[in-house]
Amino acid sequence: MSRVRFGLRASLRPGAGNGARLKPATHLVGWMVAVCLFLAACAPPSGITPTADPVLHSAVRAACATTTYRNCELDTLDLIRSVPSGTLVVICDRGNGNGRAVTTANRADADDNCSEGGTVDPSKVVAVISVP
């Protein structure tokens, strides 16, 4: 006969008399801790967009189709996946197949952020996308 109560296993051993000896169910507790740690490690941090939804992905694709920036879609989607919701992402074309995806505090600062305060020329804002 055995009974589980509050994480402890009670078992009656032959010759133990009338009393039961309590043994901790350490193997069960160990597995539960391991599963909890695994699930916590796999969960994305709060407020981070793990993947770009189809509407956002198509907006990025459409914006990148208008530029010569070679890694536009990949760089922009990588940045979108790494920023919290509500962030503004700017796609910048810097000519000759070069470009960059950056964040900005507001749309008015997009040109300044693309040109890094006027130090990068040429620099053109392709699109400003709000991360949902």
Image (cartoon, helix red, strand yellow):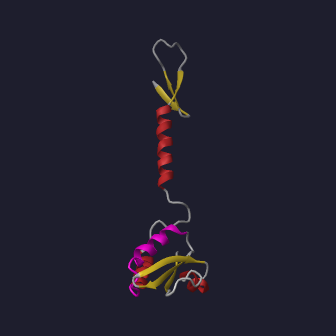
Query: How many tags in the picture?
Result: 0
Residue 52 lies in what quarter of the image?
bottom left
Residue 13 in the image, given as x and y percentages of width and height: 47, 17
Which residue is rendered at x = 48% and y = 71% of the image? 79
Which residue is rendered at x = 39% and y = 82% of the image? 97
Residue 130 in the image, given as x and y percentages of width and height: 53, 79
Question: Where the N terminus falls, by quadrant?
Answer: top left
Which residue is rendered at x = 40% and y = 88% of the image? 66
Given residues 10 and 93, the one toward you in this image is 93
Given residues 40 and 78, the one toward you in this image is 78
In this view, 55 is above or below 33: below
In this view, 83 is above or below 7: below
Given residues 34 and 129, the one toward you in this image is 129
Magenta stretch encompasses residue 54? no
Residue 38 in the image, given as x and y percentages of width and height: 47, 48
Residue 88 in the image, given as x and y percentages of width and height: 55, 78
In this view, 74 is above or below 18: below
Which residue is rendered at x = 56% and y = 83% of the image? 119
Part of the protein shown in magenta: 65-83
In this view, 74 is above or below 6: below
Given residues 18 and 69, the one toward you in this image is 69
Magenta stretch encompasses residue 74? yes
